Amino acid sequence: MKTEGCRDWRHLLGAYALGDLSAEERAGLEAHLEGCPECRAEAKSLDTVARLLPLADPDRFSRPAPQPSSDLGKEIAATIGRERRVVQRRRRWRFGLALSGAAAAAAVVLAIVVLPSAGGAPEQHVDFGRLPDGIKIYATLEPHAYGTEIHMYVKGVRSGTLCHVYLRGPRGERVAAGTFTYRWGDDSTAVLSSALDLSRTRAIGVRAGNRTFVATVDAAGATARAISNQEDFT
Amino acid sequence: MQSGALTRERDVREAYAAHSGELYGFALRSLGDSGLAEEAVQETFVRAWRAGERFDPEIGSLRTWLFAILRNVVIDLGRARAARPGVAEGGIEPSVEPLEQALLSWQVEEAMRRLGEDHRRVLVETQFRGRPYAEVAAELGVPEGTVKSRVYYGLRALRVVLEEMGYED
């Protein structure tokens, strides 16, 4: 039971938990604790905290809490925004493929489905068809003032494979779009860019290790079109 | 925030505003490199967003969930760094404690930061600098009983902060 005496003893409980009381003070307090379950419970809970205290390093907590750079939040928002857009595109693109599934299956080649993007700019969803077993490659091409943004999803090649991506223009010229490394289990999409305008892009290629996969791109077309995938030796 | 999900970008922004400082503090404590720590925080929020549907506030708080993700990210980054020695050279010494111990130490340090100045001061002087209560009392110009009292209330405050931070005995 809490008594008037508690008030006199309670303020010693901290030093008691930390083992800092004189023998006399300790004896007096322990006699009180004997008959006071509330103070005993309080002493027990402080004992836990007292045992944790030495884990702290005063050099660390004396300094202000470190903060990440002010741009980190924006970077995270941008990363998530990009990923969300790619997921939405992939869903729309899969939906588009499902609609044209019968025709695509008959052709057993590659389909390109062009769907209008949210902003009205035509973006192209490219499927590298007829790939070796287990390999999947999808790409989405998005027009920009600087050229073409490429979102590329690869699955099934050896983990650690370096992939070079490029676009081909109307005269067969190759314009690099960058590189990425495929990692097993990574389900994300590589975001690349090339200076070649999407309207001038005729093909997209990805060299994964010693193999190259190419899909032609019909930049002007707004309807599904079947095209072939081939090895590119040029 | 929408109940039961962390699926909208706005949810992530709110979660970042509320928890990024703490997550970064722990990541830095464990990894010892500010660049790696930021990478860990970024990866934590991206993973949280990808798995947003699975977040259930009835099972645990958002903070607890984010720390659980960060813990895994730190383990992954720690492994990657072990394979690439020398990344943290010149930075703050990375923690060599096991991760659970590092988390506990970081929690106590963070809790100490949040104490009022009076309480933190007496705990630092008597516990970390090992000074007698009477000496601290004289320096502060207060009776020794007041120092003991502050130690008591300081420990209580520390307990409350640790509980707020999710520490369970």
Image: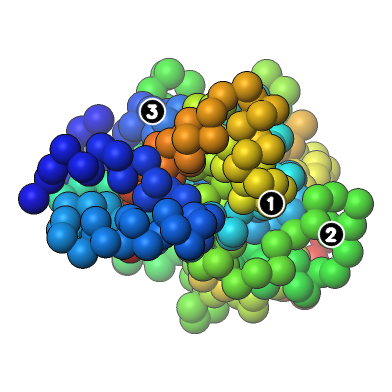
Residue that label 1 marks: B130
Mark 2 highlights which residue?
B87
Which element carries disc 1, helix, strand or loop? Answer: loop
Mark with earlier residue (2, 1): 2
Which residue shows up at 49% across the image and 81% down it?
Answer: A133
- Categorize mark 1 by other alpha carbons within 10 Å: few (<14), some (14-19), many (20+): few
Residue shown at 69% from the left, 57% from the top: B31
Q: Secondary structure at mark 3?
A: helix
Q: Residue furthest right?
A: B90
Q: Amino acid at mark 3?
A: Glu
Colour scheme shown: rainbow
Please name the residue shown 59% across and 59% down the image.
Answer: A54
Residue in the picture at 37% in, 50% down: A13
Confirm whether residue A148 shows in the render: no
Q: Quadrant of the C terminus of chain A?
A: bottom right
Front of the two marks 2 and 1: 1
For marks 2 and 3, the one nearer the N-term is 3
Q: Position of residue A107 (x, y in %)?
A: 38, 64
Q: Nearer the viewer, residue A117 or A128?
A: A117
Residue holding disc 3? B14
Which one is earlier in the sequence, the residue at label 3 or at label 1?
3
Find out whether the residues at labels 2 and 1 contact each other: C-beta distance under 8 Å: no
Relative to A100, is B133 above or below? above
